[in-house]
Image: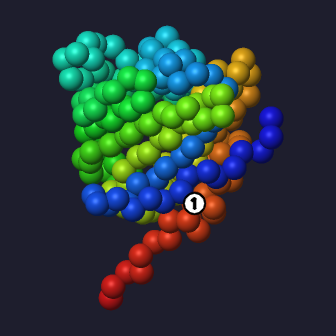
Amino acid sequence: MTPPRATGRPEIRRDGTWIVFVRHLDAPVEQAWAAVTDPRRLERWIGTWTGDPASGSVAFRMTAEEGMPEEVHHIEACEPPRLLRTRARGEGLDGQDHDWRLEIRLAEDGGGTALHLAQFLPEAAWAHSIGPGWDYYLDRLVAAETGGDVAAVDFGRDYHPALVPAYEQRFPLAPRRP
């Protein structure tokens, strides 16, 4: 496996700062959509969900990490096979309750699909942990979709803390006021 790269970049939107990642999948957009929405395919690289999406929410559990709690994701937008936007409440990196807002956009790209994943950042410093995490999971997605060894993608050895300095540069902390 080639050494992982920090691929997340900041994007300023009306509601604040987001961290955005792009991956290319050598598959039509409909297959890429299934890779990020079908519970059986999701389970290969990140987790699975249960429930009825028509109700407006599903219960999602990350299975690639031990002991992760189930989170209810409210579906804010679902436009197959192009857009999925969800919001979940949960504990943030500061120990406080926050909204976890995620957005996945898919577009045809040179015979395959460009996947854009974005996550809202309540604080820029969160990118220092969230960035390596999403690089890890998106590399697992690519491995799962190309028949690679998902288990060879090792977070603790290859992603964190190795990618943290790149995210510290891209998402500098605001100076503290005296």
Figure quadrant of residue 156: top right
Q: Nearer the viewer, residue 104 or 148?
A: 104
102 is higher (above) or lower (below) than 61: below
Give the structural element (helix, strand or loop) at label 1.
helix
**Left or right of 122 on screen, residue 117:** right
List the residue tagged with mark 1: 167
119 is higher (above) or lower (below) than 154: below
Q: Mark 1 is on which residue type?
A: Tyr
Residue furthest bottom as drawn: 178
Residue at image position (68%, 53%) is: 162
Which quadrant of the rendered structure holds the C terminus?
bottom left
Which quadrant of the rendered structure holds the N terminus?
top right
x and y percent of residue 168 in the render?
Answer: 56, 65
Using the rendered image of the protein, determine whether residue 70 is visible from the camera's viewpoint. no
Residue at image position (48%, 33%) is: 106
Residue furthest right as drawn: 1
x and y percent of residue 104 in the render?
Answer: 43, 36
Figure quadrant of residue 133: top right
**Left or right of 100 on screen, residue 117:** right
Using the rendered image of the protein, determine whether residue 118 is visible from the camera's viewpoint. yes
**Left or right of 73 on screen, residue 29:** right
x and y percent of residue 91 in the render?
Answer: 31, 44
Residue at image position (54%, 18%) is: 31
**Left or right of 2 on screen, residue 42:** left
Q: Nearer the viewer, residue 122 or 66?
A: 122
Residue at image position (39%, 62%) is: 12
User: How many discs appear?
Assistant: 1
Q: Residues within 10 Å of mark 1 (few under 14, many from 20)?
A: many
